[in-house]
Amino acid sequence: MAKEQSVLEKVVSLAKRKGFVFQSSEIYGGLNGCWDYGPLGVELLKNIKEEWWKTMTYREDVEGLDAAILMHPKVWEASGHVENFTDPMIDCKQCKARFRLDTLAEQISDKKIDKLFKEFSENISDDISESFNEIVNSELTSTEKFEKLLEDSDINKLLLSMTNCPNCGTKGEFTEPRSFNLMFKTFLGPVEKTENAIYLRPETAQGIYVNFLNVQGASRQKLPFGIAQIGKAFRNEINTKNFLFRTREFEQMEMQYFVKPEDDEKYFEYWKEKSIEWFKQMGMNGDKLRFHDHPEDKLAHYAKAATDIEYEFPFGWGEIEGIHNRTNFDLSRHEEYSGKSQKYFDEESKEKFIPFIIETSGGVSRSFMAFLVDSYNEEEVNGETRVVLKLHPKLAPVKAAIFPLVNKDGMPEIAREIEKDLRPFLRVFYDDKGAVGRRYRRQDENGTPYCITIDTQTLSDGTITVRERDSMEQVRVHKDELLKFLLEKLK
RNA sequence: GCGGGUAUAGUUUAAUGGUAGAAUGACUGCCUUCCAAGCAGUAGAUGGGAGUUCGAUUCUCCCUACCCGCACCA
């Protein structure tokens, strides 16, 4: 018995069959969490980015930027990524709980810690007793002492073997501390020396921040204004998951809006609404979109407020865009680390200050997946299942397909002529294989919004039929009016 | 990282310790005058590596990938 395929499985299967997404390096067995975009996928991806770009930058107050993926290592010290992206972690092999080494001490009572120290000092070897005693006899609290001891790689192994898991109480089942560095490292230049190590950017935002004054000066913008950028970013996630949802290489579309500190809340709200509106305008089902506000105690180190725009995927709600109030954290840090002033001078108030930043950070790959899942439809038509991607025409990889109804009576010649007329302006597809019904259905699966058919009537009056994907209804249009007709529809 | 599951043509699947059958899709041709019609033909698969065996797609182990949980996700 064939079990019912999930929507996600169907979409993954369709994506491969039709050339949207392939597994990376598939002939070698694939590469964990990496995916390639095929002929239709690259069009959809490009259209998503293009529409976003138009929405964001075809306005007076937003400029574009394309910063390098490789940046000065100090950028990531300033941003906090070096510090926050490298947490040593331990797992309890008994109950599978995972702990950050630097916060483990907080979960153990002082009484237990003191008992532990006593036990430890009885088992200690000479080579580490000196540093151990130095810490234990210091003026710190028990928790702080414990934290310090855990930082010492000579001591922590033995110490951990005597520590009970705060979750299940089992002793001696911790793994060795492992460092999780979420940033990809590489080398600048062909010599693999430690001092040449740099990172692939884990977010595109920093490329914008370090260019804040460059862009502001060159474009003569005044606050408030934004800088938009689309590009790849890389994170060494512990686990990849859910097809395109969590991958180690991904693309972001970000806009950083620089504002006066007192205006931050106003623009945070403004961009929240603008952002969710964009997804709806691109045809996404509003019922599957929601905001998810981050509670204050869960905010990242840089943020004063944060909201995710979530889409309801088959596997649950998932973030497709984040809107953050990053305050003046990033620019202040860059001022501190670079020694270069990042202040803005306001002519009206004659004040000098570091602007606040409202960030909209969208995931291109995640949006791609959301658009794909959202547009996937199965319908009953004459007892058959019709699979159709109801993509917004602006996002559809192919805008129109051209069919001669039959391959005779001069229909193919007219069809080829029409194809030639449209091709410079639109991505079109010519198909004369098999019955016309089959060709319609094939295009439905690709999400092609319009199918143009040349029939007998075309021979006498020059009109063709335009069949609309979602309604399957046809209208007759004169072939000389066709381009105008389609462009109008795609506007 | 941990636990569970899965892996056979592009896709969905069947079967078997003696190297695989189908549906669908694709391609070629015929036929087709509007929604996956028909006919004829063609190509196409056991994820990778070891082991057991006379012989492994089938049994065992390892690896890889994907899916589902947990944990992680500044």
Image (cartoon, grey):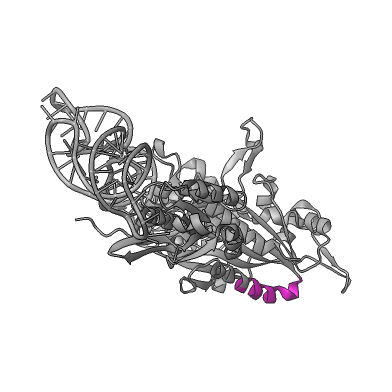
Q: If the image is split into quadrants, where does the C terminus of chain A sit?
A: bottom right
Q: Is residue A133 visible?
A: no
Please indicate whether residue A240 sits to the left or right of residue A258 in the image. left
Which portion, as a residue range, is magenta? Answer: A260-273
- Residue at position x 84%, y 61% in the image: A220
Q: Is residue A265 magenta?
A: yes
Q: Is residue A267 above or below residue A425?
A: below
The number of numbered badges drawn on the structure is 0
| Residue A365 appears left or right of B51 | right
Judge whether A386 appears above or below A192 on screen.
Answer: below
Vertically, is A70 above or below A345? Answer: above
Residue at 67% over, 63% down: A56
Q: Position of residue A383 (x, y in %)?
A: 27, 64
Q: Residue at x 32, y 66 (%)?
A: A380
Membership of A16 in magenta stretch = no
| Quarter of the figure with residue A212 | bottom right
In front of the other: A464 or A124: A464
Answer with the quarter of the image where residue A116 lies.
bottom left
Q: Residue A437: x percent and y percent?
A: 37, 56
Please, what is the dominant secondary structure of the magenta stretch? helix
Q: In the current view of this chain or complex, which residue is farthest to the front?
A: A460
Which residue is rendered at x = 81% and y = 66% of the image? Answer: A222
Along the line of sight, the residue nearer the viewer: A107 or A434: A434
Measured from the top left, where is residue A313 in percent x and y?
43, 64
